[in-house]
Image (spheres, rainbow, N blue to C red):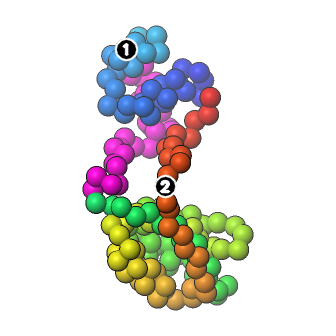
Amino acid sequence: MDKTDKAILKNLQKNARMTISDLSAAISLSMPAASERVRKLETSGVIKQYTVILDPEKINKHLTALMFLRFDSTTNGEAFAEYVKTEPEINECYYITGNFDYYLKIITEDARTLMSLLSRIKNHPGLVTTANVVVLSNIVDNVSVLSD
């Protein structure tokens, strides 16, 4: 990946709806060359998808919580991994190192809906312990993985 590819990605991360015409002007590249570069970034999997970023508050999701979970050593993690995919309020799930096995980011309506989800999660077989925190404010929410 060269500087031009990075410039394309930075521009598309700011505005994925940017036209090829605007993109080519922003990076000083011809439209056909810019279009071909974008196509290569897509087919190689660098660009996985184009999406929108929603404001949770504006869609009645007022509570963000983080949950750390530890399972006993005999529990099959694949079953839990499949389970979390069925819960739409689980926004992120990571298999992690340290004192816990999984980290979940939950975005939900309120304390009532969070408690309901936590009850369902805590009934999962093999769960030993959890640690839960409610997010008071979001300081950094950067979806970019590119560094300057």
Q: Is residue 139 magenta?
A: no
Q: Position of residue 66 (x, y in %)?
A: 52, 67
Q: Can residue 49 be seen? A: yes
Residues shaded magenta:
32-59
Classify 87 as above or below 126: above
Q: Amino acid at mark 1?
A: Met
Element on which disc 1 rests = helix
Determine which residue is flagged by label 2.
137
Q: Residues within 10 Å of mark 1 (few under 14, many from 20)?
A: some
Measuring 31% from the left and 23% from the top, which residue is drawn there?
Answer: 19
Give coordinates of residue 137: x percent, y percent: 49, 55
Name the spot of residue 40 as percent of width and height, x first: 46, 30
Q: 42 or 4, which is in the foreground?
A: 4
Cα–Cα span, label 2 and label 1: 42 Å
Residue 119's quadrant in the figure? bottom left
Which residue is depicted at the point 39% across and 43% down? 49
Which residue is rendered at x = 43% and y = 15% of the image? 26
Say whether residue 86 is visible. Answer: no
Nearest the camera: 138 or 127? 138
**SS class, disc 2:** loop
Residue 55 belongs to the span the image colors magenta: yes
Q: Is residue 135 above or below residue 118?
A: above
Which mark is in front, 2 or 1?
A: 2
Q: Is residue 76 above or below residue 65?
A: below
Quadrant where the N terminus is found in the figure: top right
On the rendered image, what quadrant is the C terminus found in? top right
Q: Quadrant of residue 51?
A: top left
- Write the residue at 46% across / 88% down: 123
Q: Nearer the viewer, residue 88 or 56?
A: 56
Q: State the mark number for residue 31.
A: 1
Identify the disc placed on residue 139.
none
